[in-house]
């Protein structure tokens, strides 16, 4: 029996690996619906695949399965019974799900009894992971990830010894992503218009990161100051301009 399950897991794992490789090679893995599908398949293998490998556990799993079984056999879907005694400890929804699972999987087994828990565990994990990831994790990670692309242009443009500054409020992230990806330390932090204008009037070639709206404003208000746009990229939720004086 153990050898059978090992063989089944091995064959299914190989099949899943081939599918993932195909999606990645075809470039389809970047599509959101493909990512969701792959996550769903992964959760299914993780939470549902092996739930029928062992017997039901005492005392709860046997009792829940029996209540659902008597519900199906007796035809009473409201007044639940266990060993022909009225069962009022739990509401009927979960037992309905076990009963429907028995129809889906053609009988009461350890797998059909556990399938509703595995299914909703999968959906809950995916839902919680999705909302926590998009609302908490991604906003923290994305500025660092996106800063990599404009940092590549910074590294290709700036020569050793030339200075890089940052003007405006970049939030709690600050200079950290750009320090990390460019290797430039320190990056000067400029807060006022007068400071940044004096910086750009320097005779040496200098560089600065702006929010694009700040770059546009200063370009219009001070047309005599050399503000040459080199690159414009989205970094997290910000529109960032990489600017030089020459």
Image (cartoon, rainbow, N blue to C red):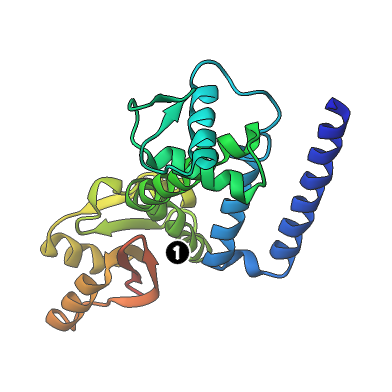
In the visual, does 246 lie left or right of 41? left
Circle 1: element type:
helix
Quadrant that contains the N terminus: top right
Look at 44% across and 59% down and name the residue there: 146
- Residue 31: name its quadrant: bottom right
Q: Position of residue 238 (x, y in %)?
A: 30, 64
Residue lying furthest top in this view? 58
| Nearer to us in this view, 36 or 223 | 36
Q: Position of residue 222 (x, y in %)?
A: 15, 79
In the visual, does 213 lie left or right of 147? left
Q: Position of residue 140 (x, y in %)?
A: 35, 47
| Nearer to us in this view, 95 or 75 | 75
The answer to whether residue 104 is above or below residue 98 is: below
| Nearer to us in this view, 230 or 197 | 230
Look at 33% across and 35% down and name the residue there: 91
Density class for disc 1 (Cα within 10 Å; few <14, some 14-19, many ≥20) is: many
The answer to whether residue 173 is above or below residue 29 is: above
In the visual, does 197 lie left or right of 179? left
Q: How many marks?
A: 1
The answer to whether residue 213 is above or below residue 98 is: below
Residue receiving disc 1:
150
Q: Position of residue 88 (x, y in %)?
A: 33, 27
Look at 70% across and 64% down and name the residue there: 23
Residue 178 in view (yes/no): no
Residue 18 in view (yes/no): yes
């Amino acid at each position: 029996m153990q050898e059978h399950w090992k063989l089944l897991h091995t064959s299914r794992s190989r099949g899943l690996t081939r599918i993932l490789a195909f999606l990645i090679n075809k470039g389809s893995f970047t599509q959101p619906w493909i990512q969701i599908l792959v996550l769903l398949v992964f959760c299914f293998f993780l939470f549902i695949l092996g739930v029928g490998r062992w017997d039901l556990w005492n005392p709860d799993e046997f009792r829940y399965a029996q209540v659902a079984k008597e519900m199906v056999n007796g035809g009473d879907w409201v007044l639940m019974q266990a060993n022909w005694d009225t069962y009022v400890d739990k509401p009927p929804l979960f037992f309905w799900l076990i009963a429907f699972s028995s129809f889906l999987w053609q009988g009461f087994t350890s797998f059909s009894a556990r399938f509703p828990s595995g299914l909703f565990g999968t959906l809950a994990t995916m839902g919680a992971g999705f909302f926590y990831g998009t609302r908490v994790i991604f906003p923290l990670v994305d500025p660092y990830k996106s800063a990599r692309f404009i940092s590549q242009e910074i590294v290709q443009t700036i020569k050793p010894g030339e200075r890089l500054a940052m003007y405006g409020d970049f939030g709690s992230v600050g200079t950290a992503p750009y320090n990390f990806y460019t290797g430039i330390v320190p990056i000067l932090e400029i807060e006022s218009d007068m400071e940044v204008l004096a910086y750009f009037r320097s005779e040496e070639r200098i560089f600065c990161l702006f929010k694009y709206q700040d770059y546009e404003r200063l370009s219009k208000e001070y047309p005599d100051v050399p503000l040459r746009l080199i690159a414009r990229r989205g970094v997290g939720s910000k529109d960032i301009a990489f600017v030089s004086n020459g």
